[in-house]
Amino acid sequence: MSDKTPSIIDRIRENRDYQFYILYTVLYLFIILLTDIVNDIVGNNYGWNDVHQYWLHAENMFNGMMPYEDDPSAYPPLAFFLDLIPYIITPTEPGYNYSFAIMTYLFSLLAIHGLLKFCDSRGISHSYVYFTFALLIIGVNNFFIARNDTITTVFVVLSILFYLDRKYVPAFVLLALGIMTKIYPIFLLPILLIPFLARKDLKSFFKYGALTALVCFVIELPVLINDPSTAFSYLTQHSGRGVEIESVVAIPLMIVSLIDDSLVYVGMDENESWDLFGTLADSVEPYIMPITFLIIGAFIVYFLYKMYKNEDDSERSMPLMLLACGIVLMIFMTFNKVFCAQYVMWIVMMYPFLVYSFKSLGADPKRLRIYLILLCAASLLTVLFMGDVVEGESKRITVQYILADTLKGAIAIILTCHLLKTLIRSLKPAQD
């Protein structure tokens, strides 16, 4: 027998995970290069536009400006401090672009590693993780490497991983970090707390709810001390946004704009988002977010009632909880007045969890993969046709763009219904 130690090449050949890490890294570098190319072709810093905003926040802080008081933003305070990390490494803007992309890459590696371990613990193929991150790179594309949604979503994934291992303190701390980077994970908090209520564990319910609130408060504290009047201005920045042209609810309004552009027309808001304005759009906008919250609230109440009635043990409550997380995210994306291209990564990165959930509940997860691919493709299609809308002199909605957004909206609704239908079927035994 030979005692020869396997070479690095041999180890890579024998290990599919190593092969995937290499492929993933190559794809990541390719998307960075593609972003630079698109940036040069389109101009106006198109490819790195959001990263440019992150760089400005970091630059302003280094020049003594305070978040919110001197530098308004739609992001919670932790986003500002994360913006500083690549700035410390490369303070010039071109270098900052690459440093930020490297940071999102490193964060994504944490999620990949954790999800691979999750698959091992649940007897699930690693191929589901490979698919997830290949789709994020190819399907979400530039928006995956150049948005802070990536960092937020990794916080969510890590939070769920700790939660499933019953390590609740780090789970809820990480969820709080996600909330204070980008607000959307707050909709997952009640879903993660409901299993405690279902088991009548009120102590844990209040303990971990309070822990999440405390971490959020500590992160908020510096800006709260500096200027209480602006410390929560990021909340009003979100609620005050118009109906974004990428949203599902914008579709009927955009159809009206084809008939009468005095009722609905396109413009840019203060967040540099392309939104709908006009008599009809302005009259509808104030009701969209409250209706979205009502729908989410109704689902949470329904889920709480069914879980409490079921009194499931933890083995069953976990896949139900994961499925409910996916549903809440899809409801928010589908009914909210903002549905940016990068939002699809929120549900794509949940894919291994959803596969586990479906398999555990006796459902077939095959269609999930198809729906996620279609959702990403349709989202990129809206971005492609958006150029015809925002770059023309008239800023008019085109039929092509409406059709692309309608396709994305239809897929989002189908996926939401598919997840909801699976949950309802899985909860039916509670009625017997």
Image (cartoon, helix red, strand yellow):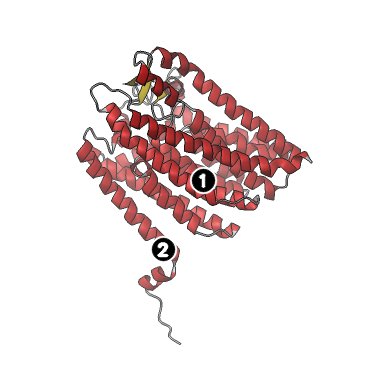
**Position of residue 109 measured from the top left corner of the image (x, y, whole percent):** 42, 52
Q: Nearer the viewer, residue 321 or 399?
A: 399
Residue occupying the point 61% across, 28% down: 297
Q: Secondary structure at mark 1?
A: loop
- Residue receiving disc 2: 18
Image check: 379 left or right of 197?
left
Give the quarter of the figure containing the C terminus: top right
Residue occupying the point 44% across, 62% down: 17
Q: Quadrant of residue 190?
A: top right
Q: Quadrant of residue 15?
A: bottom left
Whether residue 308 is visible to the viewer of this picture, yes or no, is yes
- Residue receiving disc 1: 350
Image check: 274 left or right of 328?
left
Image check: 272 left or right of 297?
left
Q: Secondary structure at mark 2?
A: helix
Q: Nearer the viewer, residue 262 or 145?
A: 262
Q: Earlier in the sequence, mark 2 or mark 1?
A: 2
Q: Nearer the viewer, residue 97 or 411?
A: 411
Q: Amino acid at mark 2?
A: Tyr
**Position of residue 196 measured from the top left corner of the image (x, y, whole percent):** 69, 39
Q: CA gap, disc 2 to disc 1?
A: 22 Å
